[in-house]
Image: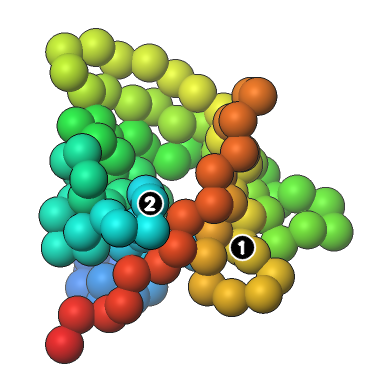
Amino acid sequence: MRRAGGLAIAIMLAPAALLAGPFDGIFRQAANAECGLVGVDGGALEIRDNVFHGVESRCEMTRPVNVDRMDAILYTLECAGEGTTWSERVMMMNAADNDDIFMIWDGYAFRYSRCPEPN
């Protein structure tokens, strides 16, 4: 019983880096997007700890499934924003040539450029 209690405390005290998701970062929605503004038109998108922060929306990235032989993960997004809730499936994939990511929705594909790390 003591081991279980110690493990629970260790998990609670784990550094935030251990909770980070594989696609964490801030990404431009367009070439001229403002990286310092997250979640607004003309700003950036943020993925942090498996939560996607879009334009006036927030989605929990749940039920991850690794895509066989690809650097990609399929997620179910549980989203809320602008007074509504919805669920979507999305595939997240790293670009082969740089730090960009791809988000592939049913019928749509977006490439987002990673914003530089703040100083």
Residue 35 sits in quarter: bottom left
- Between circles 1 and 2, the one closer to the viewer is 2
> Can residue 103 be seen in this snapshot?
yes
Dot 1 and dot 2 residues touching (CB under 8 Å) = no
Q: Is residue 116 rendered to the left or right of residue 72? A: left
Task: Say if residue 5 shows up in the picture.
Answer: no
Q: Secondary structure at mark 1?
A: strand
Vertical side of 55 occupied by 25: above or below: below
Q: Tell me the residue at 38%/51% (across/down).
A: 30
Circle 1 residue: 94
- Residue type of the residue flagged with mark 1: Asn
The Cα–Cα distance between marks 1 and 2, rounded to whole angstroms, is: 17 Å
Residue under label 2, please give it: 30
**Residue, x 35% and y 65% (percent of image)?**
25
As displayed, is residue 108 above or below residue 8?
A: above
Q: Which of pointers 1 and 2 lies earlier in the amino acid sequence?
A: 2
Q: Residue at x 41, y 67 (%)?
A: 114
Q: Quadrant of residue 46?
A: bottom left
- On the image, the x and y values in percent for residue 69 come to 85, 59
Q: Is residue 31 above or below residue 103?
A: below
Task: Choose top left, top right, bottom left or bottom right for residue 65.
Answer: top right
User: Along the horizontal axis of the image, is 84 left or right of 87?
Assistant: left
- In the image, taking residue 58 as reference, residue 28 lies left or right, namely right
The disc label shown at residue 72, or none: none
Q: Please provide percent x and percent y for residue 79.
A: 33, 26
Q: Which of the two residues, 107 or 62, is positioned nearer the viewer here?
A: 107
Of 48 and 64, nearer the camera is 48
